[in-house]
Image (cartoon, grey):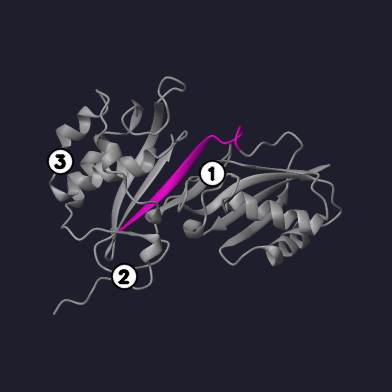
Amino acid sequence: MARCKLFIEYDGTRYSGWQIQKNARTVAGELTSAIGKVLDSADFELYGAGRTDAGVHALRQVAHLEAKTMLAPEILRRKINDELPADVNILEIEKASPQFHARHDAVARSYLYQISRRRTAFGKKMVWWIKDPLDINKMQAAADLFVGMKDFQSFTADDPEEKSTKVHIEKIEVREHGDLILIRFLGSHFLWKMVRQVVGVIAEVGRGKLSIEQAGTFLVRRSNQPAALTAPPSGLFLERIYYPQDKKLESLEPVLPLHSEPKR
């Protein structure tokens, strides 16, 4: 058996998330089917670095594959891609050590969220269109509340009784790019629906419908309000999985550039 490291991009719009589920179309399900056809075997292990929810995309998801094959990594990549639907693509396959584990060896993860200030004909499934004016300075100030080791009990669908809700966030950047507002999260790990709920609160502050002080109280006392403000999955991308020695991304670029509408 040989172990490989896979880098995968996908448009999550048509899928019920990464993880294989009964009676649902998933990204891991499509990959498993394609790999099985190429290897003509079900005797392999595919394990992703993280689970993305229904409708969430990935720019560079990582998985490890353990299988019996004599195919070179690049040939294996091409053959698997030939069996995959157009909205799932393996960017790269490289040999990995037998001990490499896509999830357990990861030291950090980053997510990108795209908010559009205008209606778009091309990027609808990759943005959250907010019609209200947004104050980006207030949004960054709200984002700063969540940096550091914080308790995100108000920002997850996970059961706080079953797992820790404390997460270390290294950085949250809020930037304008044409008519897009980009929000990047960099942290040790993320809870179920956490990023989308934090984005929803940041956006509500940007709208002026929630104060920065009110947003801060959600980190002190458990509240159901962030769940009610959950941002849609369309604008969320798993951006990177980081391993020891990996360099962190410095530039913040949109997935789909959205130029500002011309002023009349």
Specify the amino acid type for callout 3: Leu
Q: Name the spot of residue 212 as percent of width and height, x first.
A: 17, 37
Residue 110, disc: none
Which one is in front in this view, the residue at disc 2 or the one at disc 1?
2
Q: Is residue 89 left or right of residue 16?
A: right
Q: Amino acid at mark 2?
A: Thr
Disc 3 designates what residue? 210
Question: Which quadrant holds the C terminus?
Answer: bottom left
Cα separation between marks 2 and 1:
29 Å
**Residue range corresponding to the magenta coloring:** 103-115
Percent of width and height locating residue 21: 59, 44
What is the three-letter code of the residue carrying label 1? Ile
Q: Which residue is mark 2?
A: 120
Image mark for residue 241: 1
Q: State the residue lying farthest toward the bottom.
A: 264
Q: In what element is the residue under mark 1? A: strand
Left or right placement of residue 107 versus residue 81 in this view: left
